[in-house]
């Protein structure tokens, strides 16, 4: 299978769509998982669910950054740096600000209510939330007060990485087209990626645990900027892409084995090894290596399967590609609001989870249908505005009737 960079990569569009679908499932799961903190939690939690969610936890956001790098590499030859900067800013920063001031607010409100930190009253809470000098919930303040981006943290990170690559567009393209890069075998390139992520994990993970705060979030930057960079160069090296498609089954086996090792370790299968994690350098590097193998094997595996099976257009894909960003903006707030409404009903946890997922999907669908019909909402949600169409026939008929 070969790729032409001037053609539409439907497999990447499918991957982006499926990745955001997994994100919705994951955030519904966060309401029910046992050990991981979230904005609000169900009374019925599951440890088994945690093991299932770990399957995608290490690489689900990496896949989105990988796709972000691919997307930028594909469009950058056709546009100037100024146009790309304006486009990325309007598509990422405007929705971010809209989300922070409007969409994210219920998440903070219901989280505070669930912890009995505030009294009911949404509008009064919103006024305090947007006031950087508010005294409300002082322990939860950042440098901008209560304002936060919560699940929208992906947007500022992607904007910063895109800006860096747009500024360095010329030297990066020279490197991408150089004999040095084109002569690197795919196996060597991916081995280097595994070693690089192992190094990032070893050097930064413990001292800079993920915060999603952009500033001083060095482990996340080391990980996601590495992934974004590889995505950018990956799409420009056709034989790398062909390699992951051809080796997709081997990658799947490696990914499953790495996942089994991680789950086994979580259930104390390697207590003698785990006890040396803090004191033995080789043991610590081994853990980082397994983490890195698991991360890249799953990422390249899904890219390979998508390239083999999904590189074709579809009416569903055409609709979903336009709906992705609005759905992403809306989904977590809808999950939290609907979970709060369902909680007093004391439903069976499985029934409640199915209802919660169904209501979230329906809410995203209805929300998108409203957003795409209103230009100001399109702009606020990162979509292009559309010109209103007037009927020429109606105008002619109107003139005749005067």
Image (spheres, grey):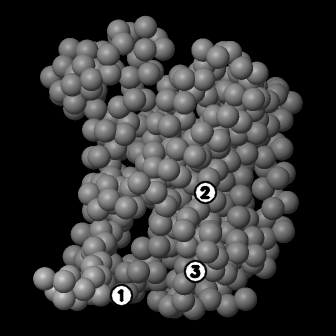
Q: Position of residue 245 (x, y in %)?
A: 74, 77
Tell me how far mark 1 sits from mark 2, CA to CA. Answer: 26 Å
Question: Which residue ends up furthest to the front in the rendered image?
Answer: 401
The quarter in which the C terminus is drawn is bottom left
Residue with the mark numbered 3? 9
The quarter in which the N terminus is drawn is bottom right
Q: Secondary structure at mark 3?
A: loop
Q: Position of residue 100 (x, y in %)?
A: 31, 40
Q: Position of residue 355 (x, y in %)?
A: 67, 34
State the residue in front, 54 or 397. Answer: 397
Give the residue displayed 37% in from the left and 87% down from the top: 77
Graded by Cα atoms within 10 Å as few (under 14), some (14 to 19) or many (20 or more), the crowding at tag 2 reads some
Residue 185 visible to the viewer = no
Residue with the mark numbered 2? 19
Look at the picture and state if 249 lies above or below 170: above
Graded by Cα atoms within 10 Å as few (under 14), some (14 to 19) or many (20 or more), the crowding at tag 3 reads many
Q: Secondary structure at mark 1?
A: helix
Badges 1 and 3: C-beta atoms under 8 Å apart? no
State the residue in front, 158 or 355. Answer: 355
Please tell me which of labels 2 and 3 falls first in the chain: 3
Tell me how far mark 2 sits from mark 3, CA to CA. Answer: 16 Å
Look at the picture and state if 68 lies above or below 129: below
State the residue in front, 395 or 207. Answer: 395
Please tell me which of labels 1 and 3 falls first in the chain: 3
Give the residue displayed 84% in from the left and 68% down from the top: 249
């Amino acid at each position: 299978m070969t790729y032409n960079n001037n053609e539409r990569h439907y497999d990447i569009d499918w991957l982006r769509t499926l990745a955001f679908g997994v994100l919705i499932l994951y955030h519904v799961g966060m309401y029910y998982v046992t050990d991981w903190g979230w904005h609000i939690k169900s009374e019925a939690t599951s440890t088994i669910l945690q093991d299932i969610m770990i399957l995608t936890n290490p690489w689900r956001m990496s896949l989105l950054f990988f796709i972000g790098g691919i997307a930028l590499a594909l469009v950058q030859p056709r546009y100037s740096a100024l146009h790309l900067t304006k486009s990325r800013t309007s598509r990422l920063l405007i929705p971010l600000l809209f989300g922070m001031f409007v969409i994210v607010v219920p998440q903070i409100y219901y989280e505070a209510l669930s912890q009995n930190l505030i009294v009911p009253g949404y509008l009064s809470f919103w006024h305090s939330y947007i006031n950087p000098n508010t005294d409300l919930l002082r322990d939860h303040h950042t440098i901008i007060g209560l304002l936060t981006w919560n699940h929208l943290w992906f947007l500022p990170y992607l904007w910063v990485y895109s800006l860096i690559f747009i500024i360095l567009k010329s030297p990066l393209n020279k490197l991408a087209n150089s004999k040095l890069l084109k002569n690197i075998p795919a196996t060597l390139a991916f081995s280097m990626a595994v070693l690089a992520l192992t190094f990032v994990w070893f050097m930064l993970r413990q001292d800079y645990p993920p915060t999603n705060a952009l500033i001083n979030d060095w482990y996340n930057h080391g990980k996601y900027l590495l992934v974004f960079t590889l995505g950018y160069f990956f799409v420009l090296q056709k034989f790398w892409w062909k390699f992951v498609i051809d080796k997709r089954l081997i990658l799947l086996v490696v990914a499953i084995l790495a996942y089994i090792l991680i789950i086994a370790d979580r259930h104390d299968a390697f207590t003698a090894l785990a006890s040396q994690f803090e004191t033995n350098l080789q043991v610590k590097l081994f853990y980082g290596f397994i983490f890195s193998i698991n991360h890249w094997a799953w990422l390249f595996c899904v890219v390979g399967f998508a390239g083999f099976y999904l590189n074709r257009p579809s009416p569903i894909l055409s609709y979903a590609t336009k709906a992705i960003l609005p759905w992403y903006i809306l989904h977590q707030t809808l999950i939290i609001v609907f979970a709060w409404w369902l909680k007093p009903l004391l439903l069976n946890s499985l029934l409640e989870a199915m209802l919660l997922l169904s209501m979230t999907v329906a809410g995203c669908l209805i929300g998108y249908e409203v957003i795409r019909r209103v230009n100001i909402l399109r702009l606020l949600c990162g979509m292009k505005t559309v010109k209103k169409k007037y009927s020429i026939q109606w105008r002619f008929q109107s003139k005749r009737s005067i």
